[in-house]
Amino acid sequence: MRRSEAVALALLAGLLLAGCRPAPEAPTPLLPALAAQAAALDRISLAQADGKRMLVRREGRWWIENEQWPVARRWLDPLLVGLLDARCDEPRTARPEHFDRLGLVWPSAPDPLIGAAFARPTGRLGFYFAPTPTYLYIGHPHPRGGSFVRVEGAPSSCLSHADLRLPVALSEWREPQLLDAPWWTPLEVGVAEAGPVRWLRPDEPDHAALWSAAANLRQIELRPARLPLPPAQRRLHLRAADGRLKVVELRGRPELTWARVDAPDPRYAGREFRLPHDVAVALWVPLADAGASP
């Protein structure tokens, strides 16, 4: 056999053997039960630096238990979508003494070096697929993308290529919108102070900012109403296309405005809500004679 033929046979044999080798195993799903049981999942616990919360799902909507307030979908929805496909793409340390460096313990000891290097918060989530929850730690982001994660009880921590984001504070898990639809697109907006309601025209330039703010009421803090409440300084009247009316009382000043929703719903009863500055300033704009109708 000539040398060239021998080399060709050796190369062919190598290719055949390589083809028989098993393909590399795919990365392990981070939460394999999530895809199968996502529709039935109705409880998620949260633990972050400033405390704990329990999220519960009722009638297709997530709520913060014991607060009777809906969960902010802008945080929960992308997190759950990301976790559906999240994998343990790169196994990392299995040494518990190193978990804190990656933000994979709770509660974690404050570390100024970690705080300076990573801008994103960390936390622990508990998924109730069974009576015993599965705990997932979401740690610091990787500089080149992805998140350090750890499933409690797994042999090691992981780097997942999924971008798993948490809000800075637990209070941000509250839905910021003060009212639900259809109040985001009211048919009419009225303002009352000492006298009758004055219904504003949406096309009136002087009241465009007030109209926009009334249709975009947001809360940044809630507290029990301090009874007896003083008379409201201003009332917003929002009329939906179906004729329903919602009244929101305003107290305070543009720099510190508290609102009370005149509605019997448990989420509003006995509570006041602090409005963000950009919304409050627009709602306190003085009303001129023009642009209003009795």
Image (tube, rainbow, N blue to C red):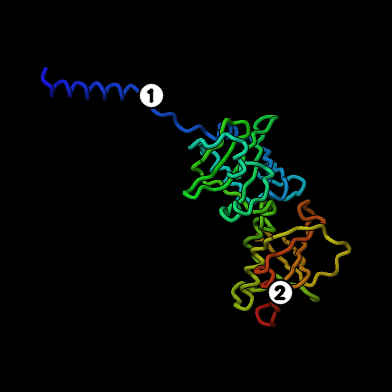
**The C terminus is located in which quarter?**
bottom right
**The N terminus is located in which quarter?**
top left
Please state the total of marks drawn on the protein image.
2
Please, which residue is most extreme toward the bottom here? 289
Q: Quadrant of residue 272?
A: bottom right
Residue 11 higher or lower than 267, as above or below: above
Q: Quadrant of residue 47?
A: top right
Q: Is residue 13 visible?
A: yes
Q: How dense is the environment of label 1, judged by Cα within 10 Å: few (below 14), some, or many (20 and up)?
A: few
CA distance for labels 2 and 1 = 70 Å
Q: Is residue 32 left or right of residue 278?
A: left
The amino acid type found where label 2 is placed reads Trp
Given residues 224 and 270, the one toward you in this image is 224
The amino acid type found where label 1 is placed reads Pro
| Residue that carries the numbered disc 2 in the rendered image | 284
Look at 63% across and 54% down and name the residue there. Answer: 112
Is disc 2 in contact with disc 1, using a CB cutoff of under 8 Å? Answer: no
Q: Is residue 212 left or right of residue 253?
A: left
Residue 95 higher or lower than 71, as above or below: above
Residue 94 higher or lower than 284, as above or below: above
Badge 1 marks a residue whose secondary structure is loop
Please, which residue is most extreme toward the left here? 2
Look at 69% across and 51% down and name the residue there. Answer: 170
Given residues 227 and 248, the one toward you in this image is 227
Look at 67% across and 29% down and name the residue there. Answer: 130
| Residue that carries the numbered disc 1 in the rendered image | 22
Q: Is residue 58 visible?
A: no
Q: How dense is the environment of label 2, judged by Cα within 10 Å: few (below 14), some, or many (20 and up)?
A: some
The spot of residue 76 in percent (x, y) is: 61, 47
The spot of residue 175 in percent (x, y) is: 67, 54
Given residues 244 and 194, the one toward you in this image is 194
Residue 5 higher or lower than 137, as above or below: above
